Image: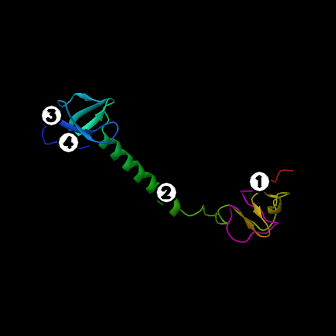
Amino acid sequence: MRISPNADALTVPDVAGARLSQIKAPRGKAVQNKIITRENGRFAVINKDGISRRTVLTVGAGAAGVVAGVAAIAGAMPAQAKAPQKLVKYQDMPKEDQRCDNCVLFEPPSSCEIVEGPISPNGWCLGYARKPA
């Protein structure tokens, strides 16, 4: 679309797109379900809902930037760290019948999903959760 220097004229493509035609329309009047107006000192074509193409493109570009930023941050974040043995009160001996080898978090032969470092199958910690029978 091309807007002529004359404030009262607007050049728009024909429906078929074969040639351009000149349509005379005063500013602020509807032309083919569009409104011609001035936005920040420039002409803008606005649809009946009052949203200009410039606004749609600006908001779309901003949203794309936010999505890209969130994706970059999420990709840079490390996986959840395991807790130190002291924090979960890990011990090498079982607590009654509670042992690491019958806990859902135990990863044979000697590790745990939530506790860092080597884990004894006969150990115990506060994160103990019995395997379902």
Mark 3 and mark 1: Cα distance apart in space:
77 Å
Mark 1 and mark 4: Cα distance apart in space:
71 Å
Mark 1 and mark 2: Cα distance apart in space:
34 Å
Residue positioned most to the bottom: 118
Which quadrant of the view contains residue 131? bottom right
Residue 123 shown in magenta = yes
Residue 78 place in picture, x, y as percent: 56, 64
Does dot 3 land on a helix, a strand or a loop?
loop
Nearest to the eye among marks 2 and 4: give it. 4
Tell me if label 3 and label 4 are in contact, CB under 8 Å.
no
Nearest to the eye among marks 1 and 2: give it. 2
Q: Which amino acid does label 3 sit on?
A: Asp
Query: What residue does disc 3 label?
Result: 8
Does dot 4 land on a helix, a strand or a loop?
loop
Q: Earlier in the sequence, mark 1 or mark 4?
A: 4
Q: Which of marks 3 and 2 is nearer the N terminus?
A: 3
Query: What residue does disc 4 label?
Result: 3
The answer to which of 31 and 81 lies nearer the viewer is: 31
Neighbour tally class for label 3: few under 14, some 14-19, many 20 plus, Cα within 10 Å: few
Q: Which of marks 3 and 1 is nearer the N terminus?
A: 3
Residue 16 place in picture, x, y as percent: 35, 38
Query: What residue does disc 2 label?
Result: 71
Query: What residue does disc 1 label?
Result: 129
Residue 98 place in picture, x, y as percent: 82, 57
Q: What residue type is labelled 4?
A: Ile
